[in-house]
Image (cartoon, coloured by chain):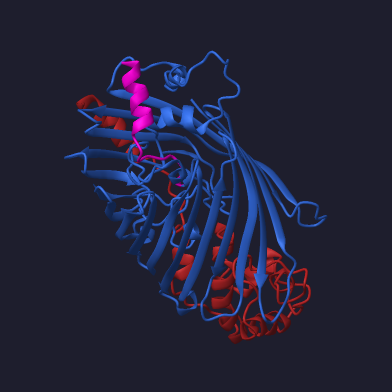
Chain colours: A red, B blue
């Protein structure tokens, strides 16, 4: 039995580490966000409605307006051309996001539209 | 000796591999699995059940008896030469098609979901002491860009049964909560965070009574993760046999890390519809208390599955799920679909699942989404 111990210890430290909580810090942690008032209002919604499923490491790093624009998901000054808006169920019947919660409450949707429409290109 | 084995096969009435095997009269996981909460490595008896009762016998020569098939259920079809070591190999892969037929949204992929080896050391009467280890390939989730290796261990634990009724297990294991259905995308698995990669290091106590079964588990999270995201907590699950062949159960789990407190509770039932058919149902809720208020919510889910067995080796299934991500909001999802599970011969499972998901909302309407999976599962 003692001979098995090294094998057991090896397996003990080589287990998988990506699970449901891997991105909890980004999704549930409180973050101080700088930037426009509109972005500060939109960020918790993006965090809660989008990043909760889009657990890509890059999504978690979009903490500024510039980062969202650079990602291509936001077109400054145009909600209609921003994927973060036009993929939503709220935008049109061909919308398909968010997958697991249906359309956003109208108040949250309005905050996102107001943010993207008013970013100075 | 072979008659004793056959007698064992025919007489033990309390084991299963998948949850729906309560339809064969089996209520508890322990007789077929080393882990009493189910899943993971099958024990010798579980392999025999899988080779005989579960799989179709149509492809065997007519001269083969059930007894002969049972004797080929060991690793690489061989009868084990000793009692203290077992090994197993598993492969599971599937063709996944999302939004089939859509010019813009169709996605297809073949996913190698699992390829792993298992080693089991066991000593004493009735496997009194066990050490179970698993290592192999399991892909990172599709929506996660991770550089970590995809070769890893999903479970490794030690177990000791003080008596046939009482056992203690320690190591990396699944969290004990609700019905451990095979569909890891089920809302009943993802909402309380007991999906395919959510194993945790911890200690589990198990009691197997004559008419009820209880689990208590304390866990400290997955030790290979950063300390601040490890979910630490407790879970309890109890099941009671009713009317001799059915079961009802309840679970509660509380866990937390540095940014999230999660409390989940559920009730479930497993109904034996006889001759291998079964109905499973679970209703539960999870409360998320986050560091940032945007993440706070209470989610509710429901699951109803039926498995109907027209002939040996074949199960027609239906899956109906309900999910309301936030009880304070209007929308909710319903996902449903039929499926077919076929065990043409021992060690092989073929499965087709179709899913239709509809979002119900009083303020907008959306197109349904569709998905199907063609799955192959092989074990040696």
| Percent coordinates x, y for residue B349 in the rendering | 57, 34
Q: Which quadrant holds residue A46? A: bottom right
Q: Residue furthest right?
A: B103
Give the residues in magenta: B1-19
Q: Would residue A81 be found to the left or right of residue B76 on screen? A: right
* Residue B93 in view in this figure: yes
Query: In the image shown, does A65 or B319 lie closer to the viewer?
Result: B319
Q: Can you see residue B186?
A: no
Q: Quadrant of the N terminus of chain B?
A: top left
- The image shows a total of numbered marks equal to 0
Residue at 48%, 50% (x, y): give it.
B181
Q: Position of residue B167 (x, y in %)?
A: 22, 43
Vertically, is B219 above or below B191? above
Estimate the x, y position of residue B308 in percent, counting from the top left. Answer: 57, 46
* Residue at figure coordinates x 43%, y 31% from the top left: B49
**At which x and y percent is residue B366?**
73, 70
Tell me which residue sits at (61%, 65%) in the image: B334
Give the farthest residue toward the left: B162
Q: Is residue A78 magenta?
A: no
| Residue A77 shown left or right of residue B248 in the figure | right
Classify B165 as above or below B76. below
**Side of B68 where B368 appears, left or right:** right
B13 is within the stretch colored magenta: yes
A12 in relation to B197, above or below = above
């Amino acid at each position: 039995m003692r001979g098995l111990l090294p094998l057991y210890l090896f397996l003990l430290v080589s287990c998988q580490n990506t699970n449901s909580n891997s991105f909890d810090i980004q999704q549930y942690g409180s973050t101080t966000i700088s930037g426009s008032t509109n972005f500060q209002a939109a960020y918790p919604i993006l965090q809660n409605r989008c990043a909760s499923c889009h657990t890509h490491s890059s999504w978690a790093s979009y903490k500024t307006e510039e980062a969202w624009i650079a990602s291509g998901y936001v077109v400054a000054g145009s909600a209609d051309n921003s994927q973060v808006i036009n993929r939503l169920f709220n935008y049109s019947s061909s919308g398909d996001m968010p997958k697991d919660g249906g359309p956003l409450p109208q108040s949250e949707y309005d905050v996102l539209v107001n943010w993207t429409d008013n970013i100075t290109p | 000796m072979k008659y004793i084995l056959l007698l064992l096969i025919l007489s033990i009435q309390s084991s299963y591999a998948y949850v729906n095997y309560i339809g064969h009269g089996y209520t508890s996981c322990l007789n077929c699995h080393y882990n009493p909460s189910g899943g993971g490595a099958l024990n010798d008896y579980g392999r025999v059940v899988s080779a005989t009762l579960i799989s179709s016998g149509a492809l065997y020569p007519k001269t083969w008896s059930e007894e002969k098939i049972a004797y080929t259920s060991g690793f690489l079809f061989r009868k084990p030469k000793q009692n203290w070591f077992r090994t197993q190999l598993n492969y599971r892969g599937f063709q996944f098609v999302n939004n089939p037929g859509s010019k813009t949204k169709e996605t297809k992929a073949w996913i190698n979901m699992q390829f792993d080896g298992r080693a089991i050391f066991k000593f004493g009467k009735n496997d009194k002491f066990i050490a179970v280890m698993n290592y192999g390939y399991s892909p990172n989730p599709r929506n996660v860009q991770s550089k970590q290796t995809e070769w890893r261990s999903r479970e490794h634990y030690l177990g000791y049964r003080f008596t046939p009724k009482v056992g203690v297990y320690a190591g990396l294991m699944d969290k004990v909560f609700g019905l451990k259905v095979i569909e890891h995308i089920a809302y009943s698995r993802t909402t309380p965070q007991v999906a395919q990669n959510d194993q945790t290091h911890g200690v589990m106590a198990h009691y197997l009574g004559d008419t009820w079964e209880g689990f208590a588990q304390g866990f400290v999270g997955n030790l290979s993760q950063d300390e601040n995201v490890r979910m630490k907590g407790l879970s309890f699950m109890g099941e009671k046999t009713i009317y001799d062949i059915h079961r009802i159960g309840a679970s509660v789990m509380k866990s937390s890390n540095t940014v999230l407190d999660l409390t989940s509770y559920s009730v479930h039932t497993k109904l034996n519809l006889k001759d291998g058919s079964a109905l499973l149902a679970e209703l539960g809720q999870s409360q998320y208390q986050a560091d940032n208020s945007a993440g706070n919510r209470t989610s509710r889910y429901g699951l109803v599955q039926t498995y109907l067995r027209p002939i040996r080796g074949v199960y027609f299934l239906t899956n109906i799920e309900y999910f309301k991500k936030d009880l304070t909001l209007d929308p909710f999802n319903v996902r449903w679909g039929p499926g077919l599970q076929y065990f043409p011969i021992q060690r092989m499972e073929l499965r087709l699942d179709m899913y239709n998901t509809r979002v119900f909302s009083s303020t907008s309407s959306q197109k349904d989404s569709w998905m199907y999976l063609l799955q192959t599962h092989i074990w040696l």
